[in-house]
Image: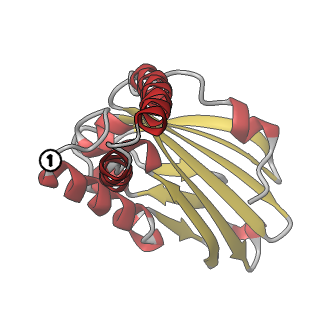
Amino acid sequence: MPVTSVMATQYDAHIHGVAEISIVMEGKELHMQLHSPADTLVGFEHKAQTQQQKQAVQTVDRYLNTVNKIVEFTGNKCNAVEIEVDVTALLPEEHGHDEHEHEHDKHAHEHDKHTHEHDEHEHKHDKHEHEHEHDGHERSDTHIEITANYQFLCDDITEISAIQIKLFEQFPALEKVQAIWIGPNGQNAQMLSKNDNSIKLN
């Protein structure tokens, strides 16, 4: 999905309760990008561990993929043609199959000392790599963001007078949304809240 450098670089802060929406309007296309701390939308910022946490991630994923629950246009009709929601940083990694294969290999070669020692060396190497990767995940898990990209085709962008952001209805922990947009009338910004959730374009 094409996005401008403005959309790619605006979100540089991680403040719980505050999300950011960047919008670029050009021709008949409208691109919208959402960034939010994971804690604000799902209530935690680590790999989902319990079944309840996994369900929370799935619920947020489904919600963000339902456009009419996210945004509403006033003055002109816009249809979503592409949606990309990224919650992968919250999804657990499955290692059970790899561990089973290792145990199988260990059993198959337990009578061959040389091969077993070789496998054990590889296992230690793999364990070291796994621990290194795990450390990397722990560092990145300190601040996890959920992102979503939306591409719309509109009949006439110049007729859009307002864009209502409906995220506050679903996420009580969301206090503010910093909206930044570029369109036919130039660039502007507006801080949205539950009581003032419409981006005023005209």
Q: Amino acid at mark 1?
A: Thr
Q: Quadrant of residue 81?
A: bottom right
Foreground residue among 109 and 63: 109
Q: Is residue 136 left or right of residue 195?
A: right
Q: x, y (%) of residue 104?
A: 32, 54
Q: Which residue is mark 1?
A: 50
**In the displayed structure, would residue 71 be above or below residue 148?**
below
The tally of labels here is 1
Query: Image quadrant for the N terminus?
Result: bottom right
Q: x, y (%) of residue 179?
A: 56, 40
Farthest residue in the right direction? Answer: 27
**Which residue is found at the position 36% from the left and 38% from the top?**
38
Q: x, y (%) of residue 101?
A: 37, 54
**Which residue is found at the position 43% from the left and 50% from the top?**
87
**Which residue is found at the position 29% from the left and 49% from the top?**
107
Secondary structure at numbered mark 1: loop
**In the displayed structure, would residue 193 be above or below residue 15?**
below
Question: Is residue 27 visible in the rendered structure shown here?
Answer: yes
**Which residue is found at the position 71% from the left and 75% from the top?**
154
Q: Is residue 93 left or right of residue 190?
A: left
Foreground residue among 96 and 101: 101
Q: x, y (%) of residue 15?
A: 40, 22
